[in-house]
Image: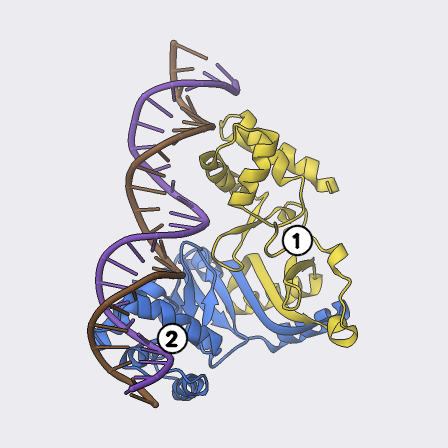
Chain colours: A yellow, B blue, C brown, D purple
Amino acid sequence: MATPGRNAAKKKFVDFLQGQKLRITPQRRAILETVFSTAQHFTAVQLLKWSRRRDKSVSRATVYRTLPLLTGSGLLREMDFGRDCVYYDPNYADRPNHNHIICLDCDMIFEFESEQINQVEVKLCQKLGFSVKTHRLQITAHCDQLKKTGVCNRKKETSGKLKPD
Amino acid sequence: MATPGRNAAKKKFVDFLQGQKLRITPQRRAILETVFSTAQHFTAVQLLKWSRRRDKSVSRATVYRTLPLLTGSGLLREMDFGRDCVYYDPNYADRPNHNHIICLDCDMIFEFESEQINQVEVKLCQKLGFSVKTHRLQITAHCDQLKKTGVCNRKKETSGKLKPD
DNA sequence: ATCAATGCAAATAATTTGCAAAAAG
DNA sequence: CTTTTTGCAAATTATTTGCATTGAT
């Protein structure tokens, strides 16, 4: 599960805390470890539950207080999907420009990168007088294979479901 | 303010209601008129306030109950921006493929369309085995003009602010 | 020692819902 | 008339906050 950048991400967070003169507590460590032991998208409530498995002393408040530190340091990104609550994506640390395809058939979320899209965006924004800082692209789509064969065997390769657990 | 498609949109909603054997009430009419008298993004709470100006009898509950009918019939679209609450965009009725640039300097939201981006997406998804249904592209960016001249005079042309009112 | 960070429980705020009364078809 | 829709107020749910205490440095 841990991709190359994961350990770097953990170190980066520790550096971030120290740089801001913030303290490295066991609770923050547990949350950090939890975040970077999955490639799945998750909610604050899930993160709380998972972090508690590592360290029973992690509280709801601490999770909610740590999340902004993680997003603020660029290691985690909010994903406004459904909307009933916020999802977080731990894969931005590795691939800050990735995009999402939400399958309307199986509700899974797939990630992909496209240098071509990035370039078109930059060029387009240039023309409009803007300099791209970040982008967020979500495509909802239907599964071709499912339509043809009645089955979709992509689920194995996914990096995260919309409504995990 | 009313673009060509606006009246068509209103008719479409009436048809939608009749098709579903739902009733056309004065409250629903007031909400519908309100939605299609602006090009701005808005929240449920704002819609309530504005609709009440037309018809004092519109209640919070009715607004929240009507909103899904409007999104369900494709006339309005949820915009997951900030996240503290849901924003709605009335411009999808006219331009279902438009994208957003969120200016980090002035917090305004600009809309633009790009056939090129649409095509790249379709092609890319094809390769991945998906058929695009909808897409959602948000770019956060800095204003070139502001950086150079210290002023941005784009605000006049905008179609909606992030935090209106 | 110092001062940031924690857990807890109470507070917010957006959205949803139950229900009896009103009104559309 | 029948069935949907409404307003109201109470309920839900994610997230935030105040405060006394704990713990990292």
Q: Position of residue B152 (x, y in %)?
A: 40, 62
Q: Where is residue A83 in the image (x, y as percent from the top left)?
A: 48, 58
Left or right, A86 with respect to A157, comes to left
Q: Position of residue B42 (x, y in %)?
A: 37, 67
Vertical order, B82 against C21 (above or below): above
Q: Which amino acid does label 1 sit on?
A: Gly
Q: Name the residue under label 2.
A: B39
Mark 2 chain: B
Q: Which amino acid does label 2 sit on?
A: Ala
Q: Position of residue A60 (x, y in %)?
A: 47, 37
Q: Name the residue under label 1.
A: A160
In the rendered image, residues at marks 2 and 1 fall on the same chain: no
When asked about the image quadrant of residue D20, the answer is top left
Left or right, A91 with respect to A156, comes to left
Q: In which quarter of the image is the C terminus of chain B?
A: bottom left
Residue appearing at x 65%, y 70% in the figure: A141
In what element is the residue under mark 2?
A: loop
